[in-house]
Amino acid sequence: MLSYQHIYHAGNLADVHKHSLLAWTLDYLTRKDKPLSYIETHSGRALYDLDDAAARKTQEAAQGIARVSDWFTPDHPYARTLAAVRAAHGPEAYPGSPLIAAELLRDTDHLHLAELHPREHAALDLAMSPYPATCHLRDGLELAFALCPPTPRRGLLLIDPSYEIKTDYDTIPRTVAKLARAWNVGIIALWYPILTSGAHKPMLNALSGAHPQALRHEVRFAPARPGHGMVGSGLFVLNPPYGLDKEAARIARKFAALA
């Protein structure tokens, strides 16, 4: 959705959930000396300033990464990436998923990042300029359909919509099924919000019914402010790598203790 700006939410608890598991997965994949493809459908600007007025307005990062950074030891790939980005850009910098991927992947890997918002895409292009990544000003799902199966065939696709387009909840199960048929060996990871309205539930029921072997992982947390409808974060992962379920369980215990 062209009105969506992630700066208001960067570094919140949903980002901690999503980004820590993404970083763990990419670190795991790069242990094997074989190139891989990384595709992201809704990239945002990749680099966020948590001292920005928009971030300070919502205070979501203060309730998120600023509060729980001690969940991750210095050698955890999420902590390593955060430290590297802050060393380069300042103590209030926060990496979005494209920058996390770029920091963890290698020159032999292929990064394709889609962003449709013109200003966000311009910021994405600038943030990614030091890295071997291709930034597409294009609808991300169209890009995914065009690339899958990618070369190299080994790799990960992250689908991370804003869900401001309410029909996403209806269309995503068909989208994931089509992409899974095209790229049956790829890791396909979908992020979704846990909502008090329950709008996500039919989508998850459809996905779970069609892909019973997928990893479905959810965490809950308090709303960012009174009346805010998101009370948790979910990841639905096809072809999850070995050990991701254990890392997800570790993160779940941290969230449960926080609650």
Image (tube, rainbow, N blue to C red):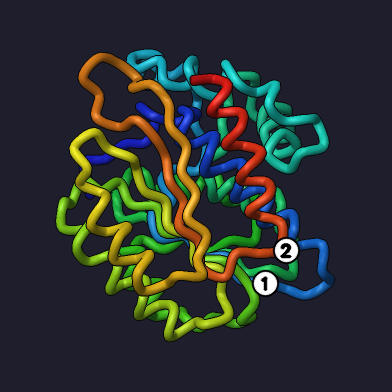
Q: Secondary structure at mark 1?
A: loop
Residue 27 in the image, given as x and y percentages of width and height: 74, 54
Q: Is residue 118 above or below residue 207?
A: above
Q: Secondary structure at mark 2?
A: helix
Q: Which one is earlier in the sequence, the residue at label 2 or at label 1? A: 2
Residue at 26% of width from left, 51% of height from top?
Answer: 201
**Marks 2/1: CA distance?**
8 Å
Q: Which residue is mark 2?
A: 29
Q: Mark 1, residues whose alpha carbon is within 10 Å: few (<14), some, or many (≥20)?
A: many
Marks 2 and 1 close (CB-CB < 8 Å): yes
Instruction: Determine the image quadrant of residue 256.
Output: top right
Q: Amino acid at mark 1?
A: Leu
Residue at 35% of width from left, 20% of height from top?
Answer: 224
Instruction: Give the left or right position of residue 225, taking residue 3 as reference.
Output: right
Residue 233 in the image, given as x and y percentages of width and height: 42, 40
Residue situated in front as seen by the camera: 7 or 70: 70
Residue 40 in the image, given as x and y percentages of width and height: 47, 60
Residue situated in front as seen by the camera: 68 or 115: 68
Residue at 25% of width from left, 24% of height from top?
Answer: 228
Q: Is residue 37 above or below residue 197?
A: below
Instruction: Give the left or right position of residue 32, taking residue 196 as reference.
Output: right
Q: Say the numbered circle drawn on residue 36.
A: 1
Q: Say the numbered circle drawn on residue 53.
A: none
Q: Mark 2, residues whose alpha carbon is within 10 Å: few (<14), some, or many (≥20)?
A: many
- For the question of whether residue 114 can be seen, the reply is no
Instruction: Give the left or right position of residue 29, taking residue 189 as reference.
Output: right
Q: In the image, which is nearer the foreground, mark 2 or mark 1?
A: 2
- For the question of whether residue 15 can be seen, the reply is yes
